[in-house]
Image: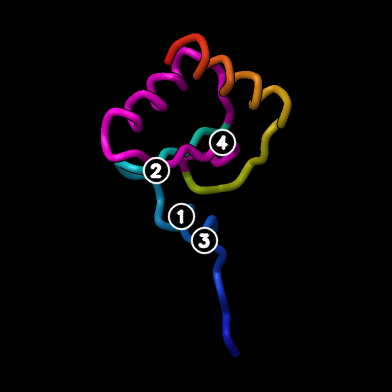
């Protein structure tokens, strides 16, 4: 039997590091902008919203999270 894990599930299973950050929610546009800027000023990275620090997928409130991420990028970056 062949078992395949999706690229996203693989990223989550490897945990956070210098190029991967998990956020359960975006509680502050200013705080998330710091993460975005840090990735932009180094080797890049991925920010997964709706994932707890433990790697448990919690999900998101799509419109609210998109608004906060957009605000972070437009106002603070």
- When the figure is inspected, residue 44 is found, relative to residue 55, above or below; the finding is above
Label pair 1/2, CB-CB below 8 angstroms: yes
Q: Is residue 12 left or right of residue 38?
A: right
Q: Earlier in the sequence, mark 1 or mark 2?
A: 1
Say the numbered circle drawn on residue 49: 4
Identify the residue under disc 1: 11
Q: Residue 38, percent across and down?
A: 32, 27
In the depicted structure, whether residue 18 falls above or below residue 15: above
Q: Residue sitting at 38 percent across and 45 percent down?
A: 16
The answer to if 41 sits in the magenta stretch is: yes
Q: Which residue is mark 3?
A: 7
> Which of marks 4 and 1 precedes in the sequence?
1
Q: Secondary structure at mark 3?
A: helix
Q: Quadrant of the C terminus?
A: top left
* Local SS, label 4: strand
- Mark 3 or mark 4: whose residue is earlier in sequence: 3
Q: CA distance from mark 2 to mark 4?
A: 11 Å
Looking at the image, tell me whether mark 3 or mark 2 is earlier in sequence order.
Answer: 3
Residue that badge 2 annotates: 20
Q: Are marks 1 and 4 in contact (CB under 8 Å)?
A: no
Tell me if residue 15 comes above or below residue 33 in the rendering.
below
Image: magenta residue range: 25-53
In whole angstroms, how far apart are the C-alphas of marks 3 and 4? 16 Å
- Magenta span includes 49: yes
């Amino acid at each position: 039997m062949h078992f395949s894990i999706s690229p996203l599930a693989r990223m989550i299973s490897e945990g956070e590091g210098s190029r991967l950050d998990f956020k359960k929610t975006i509680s502050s546009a200013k705080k998330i902008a710091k993460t975005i800027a840090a990735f932009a000023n180094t080797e890049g990275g991925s920010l997964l919203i709706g994932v707890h620090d433990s790697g448990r997928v919690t999900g998101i409130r799509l419109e609210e999270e998109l608004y906060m991420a957009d605000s972070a990028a437009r106002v603070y970056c």
